[in-house]
Structures are given as C-alpha cells and as structure tokens.
Amino acid sequence: PKEPSTAGLNPDANGERLRFVGAATRRIARGVDLDETVLGLCRATVPAFADAILVYLREPLPVGDERPTGPLRLRLRRTDRLPDYAGEDDAAADGGLLGQLAGATDHAAGGASELTEVAPGGALAEVLRGVRPLFGDSQAAGGALGELLRVERELPDGRRSILAPLRGRRRVIGAAVFLRRPTRPPFAQDDLLVAAQLATHTALGVDKAVLYGREAYIADELQRTMLPDTLPQPTGVQLASRYLPAAESARVGGDWYDAIPLPGSRVALVVGDVMGHSMTSAAIMGQLRTTAQTLAQLDLPPQEVLHHLDEQAQRLGRDRMATCLYAVYDPVAHRMVIANAGHPPPVMLHRGGRAEVLRIPAGAPIGVGGVDFQAVELDAPAGATLVLYTDGLVESRHRDVWTGIEQLREKLMETARLTRPDTPAPLEPLCDEVLDILGPGDRDDDIALLAARFDGIAPSDVAYWFLDPRAQTASQARRLARRALARWDLEELTDTVELLVSEVVTNAVRYAERPITLRLLRTDRLRCEVGDDVPQLPRLRQARATDEGGRGLFLVNRLARRWGATRLSTGKVVWFELPLP
C-alpha cells in the first residue's frame, strides 16, 4: 500500500506523520539481506516523503564487533526518484542534482559521486559524528553535502534536502540524502524527526542484514567443507550426487554422502543423516563422516564400520542419533556388500528399466549402542544404478516414508522409459528427475542423494595370480605380466610394467610369509596391485649413492602416473597406474 504523504503537514497532522513512519519502518524491517533493506527505505520514502533519495553505505561494512581499519569511505549503494519525473523540461527547470537524477537509472547517481572518502576533521565527518539529520541549507550540512555528492550542479534551494547519517549499533555505517523538487513544499521541522526515524531503522536493518550475511556465509562454508567438493572417479562405477538444505534459513544440516575409493578398485558408498538441521547436527555429521573415511581406509567390513560409528556417536554425547547406510562395491566381482543402521533402503534401477527396493535388514540407528549390525551381499550387475538417499527425499508432513519410497521407485522407472531399453539413463539428469518427486510442501528436512552407475570390469580385463614368496617370484611376475600385456595388445607398456612389477614384488617377497597376490586391471588405464601379509606401509626414501637398494619406490614414483599403498586387515596392497598408449 502507498504510504501517506508528509508534504505540507500542519501540527494537526501528527497522526498522519506517525502512520507514515510506522508503515515505512515496517517496510524497511521486512528486508532480510542488504539490498532488500536499502530498497525498502527507497520505496517507503519516494514519493511519500521525498522526490529522490541517495543512500551511501560504508565500504567495507564492518560486521558485529569488527573494528574498521583504514579511512572511512562511503559508496553510493542505491538511488531512487519519482518514476514520472523524467521529462527533459522538468529536469532543465530544476537545473540541479534532481535534474541529473531525472535522467539516471534507479541504481545510477546521475552527477553524484559513486565513492567518497571522508576526510578526518572535515564537514562531512563532523555531521556523521553528530548523528542527527540536518537540513541541506544549514552551514554544517551544506559543506558536508558538497563533500559527499561532489556534484557540478547546485542542490535544490531552501529546505528541500536533508542529510541523515546512518548509525548502527556501534558506529556510523552510511548516510541518506532526501531531496524534494522546487514544485513541492519544502521539508518541515518535524520532517527531521521522520528522517531520524527512517535513518535509525535503516541502520539497524543494515546491521542485521550484514550479520545475517556473515552467518549465511559461515553456514555455507561449513556445509561445503563437510561434504565432498567433487566425487572421485573410481574404476568401474559412475557417480552423481545432490544436496538440498531443509530451507534457506537453515543452510546446514546433518545429512551427508560420500564415495571412498578402496583397495582392489572397490569403492565405499555412504549416505547418512544426523538428527536435526542445525550447526550442532552439521558438526556431529562432520565427525561421523571423518570417522567413516578413516574406518574405510582400514578396509573393515560394512557392519564393522557401522559398529565403530555407533561407538563414536556414543562418545560424542547423549542423544547423538544418526542413520547410515554403508555399501562396498566390487567392480571385478560385480557384487556389493551393504549394511544398514536405521536408514531408508536403497533403490536399484536395473538396465531394463525395472526398479526394486533392496531388502536389507534395517538395524538400529547409530548412537543406540549395544546393537549388532548385519551385512548382506547382493549382485551388482553392469548397467544397474544404485540410488542412496536420506529420508528428506521420501518423507514429509504430507506422506509417510513408504509412500515416498514407492514414488521414488516409480519415478526411476518412468525416467528409465525415456531412454532406449539397452541404454541406462544419464546420471546427472536422473538425479534432477528424482528431485522432481518433491512437492511444494515436502521440504521439511535436508536431502542428500547419491547415485552410482555400476559399469563393472569384464573378466577378460582382469589378470590375477597367487605367487609364493621365493627368490624366483620377481622373474615369474615379470613373465606373467608380459603375457597379460601381449593378450591385451599393450606391448608398448611391457618394459615399464616389467620394471615396476619387479620392484614392487621384490619388496613384497622380502618380508612376506604367505603367498602374495598380483593383479592387473585394464580399463581406461592399466592398474597393477601387489598384496602381501605385512601391514607396514612402504615409504618413499631418497637412497644414498652408496646404497645397493632403496630405489624401487623411487622408480615407481617417477614412471607411474599414480601409485599408493593401503593397509588391509590381512596386510597391505601396493598399487600403481599407467596410462594406456
């Protein structure tokens, strides 16, 4: 609604002035961010109180108790004017700043300065320090306006301009200039009180918006660091993910997802949900996610991972409840092992378009304590897609969780029908289609979504051997690797692979007591893995000139694209990768 005008009010019109101030301050207070607050001031005062307004804010704006450094600078944040005051004749008749503003856009200043550095001890600094609004024709305000605006044309004559400092909770954060054209009555003495009220509420709103912006930035950064920046690209599986907070006002929550590469080209797929969507939930989620990553690197079975997560949640405090689903996919065996801790079951979309809800023992949530978790082993056929999600996707005030799961299953089948029967739906569009099951009132909780497309590794692309730890094992490993490369038409890599395999196998034979394993995998790269029963991980050392050995890993580091070593429950695996020719 249009605010009542204060132009030409007499002493009997105080009620109308109060109604205007009330309506204007409510409009200013509705703003959440900085632009909305400043826009609220402009829309509330033009044309009800002034014909034009210029709003300057400190740059940079201090946040909370921050102590500003450097000189005080004011930047023009926004201007506004009468929408019908743009005719050339009217502009020429004024001949001053209003005429220049008439030909400018809403965000432009016409001839006004965009950035002003406040000189210490100058007229503008004195007015800002005094806080009270002043008429533009006063001696103090006249010099301050000239310093602030630095316009080539003169200001409107008489009391047709007001300079109002904007003071926040602790310091001056800007200034507002209200202008009236000559055809309108000048400002009255009581209009200084109106300007003071508008300036006070605007400054408090700016303070609030800056604090809100800082909190939103912290929340966004916290959530961003808690979740993976990018998903890995493990061999034999494609990955895609989505995360949606519960609401704009609650940017952080306890939902998380993760994909963790494991030895043997396997990958761990994790999705979890800590109760609530607050900073506390996000902090607990971050600790549980870090714990899950550490446990995954130990290559523990899924049920053991959930058991240790349960213990960790109990150490974090009482009522630290969370649900979690942990799956390990093996692209060579085309199998996966899944354990569940009170989480909604995953959905498997098969290549032919059939979607099924996997039957997995639900288990108790993490944090209950004293509960055994069960793992099940399932087929993971090539071309199938595993969809992991949190309950925010399938449960809301308008539907129960099983109704939502059925809608998710139907949505996956509907999306699969849009592609050829022998061609799986692309993962990224599939994730977007899945989120379409959310209705207008279904965003009650955070949503984490992780989709994994199983490509697998064909048996013809895998070579696997058990080798006894003997002095002749290195030469035997070189011979087996050479035959495998010849079968795959990769003779160009023979010399490099033989050298690196010989070095890694020699190190394994030196300390191993049980047979070692040698495996070659051909995908978009060549990967070699050597496993033994010794848990100590090798370290890259700089061999001295007099040393007879110690250069094996140095050669691996120089010749391989990537290499690494992972400790297992039964020993370790040392691996390296080479690009295909």
Image (spheres, helix red, strand yellow):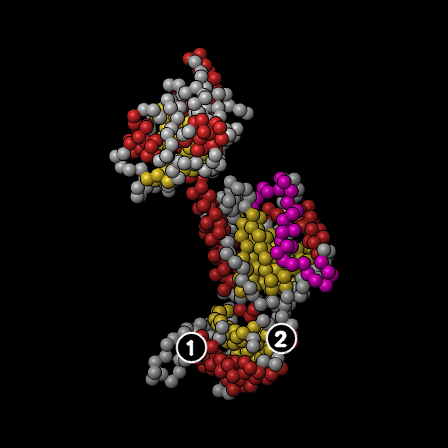
**N-terminal of the two: label 2 or label 1?**
2
Residue 231, horizontal then vertical, whole percent: 54, 59
Residue found at x 67% / y 50%:
408
Q: Which residues are magenta?
A: 419-446
Lateral position of residue 419 relative to residue 220, left or right: right
Q: Is residue 395 above or below residue 226?
A: above
Q: Quadrant of residue 456?
A: bottom right
Which mark, residue 471? none
Lateral position of residue 556 relative to residue 153, left or right: right
Residue found at x 53% / y 52%:
256
Q: Is residue 442 magenta?
A: yes
Residue found at x 50% / y 69%:
568
Q: Is residue 175 visible?
A: yes
Q: Is residue 35 magenta?
A: no
Pointer 2 with pointer 1, Cβ within 8 A: no
Residue linked to disc 1 = 554
- Label 1 is placed on what type of residue? Phe
Residue linked to disc 2 = 461
Residue 130, horizontal then vertical, whole percent: 30, 28
Q: CA distance from mark 2 to mark 1?
A: 28 Å
Lateral position of residue 470 relative to residue 443, left or right: left
Principal secondary structure, stretch drawn in magenta: loop
Q: Quadrant of the C terminus?
A: bottom right
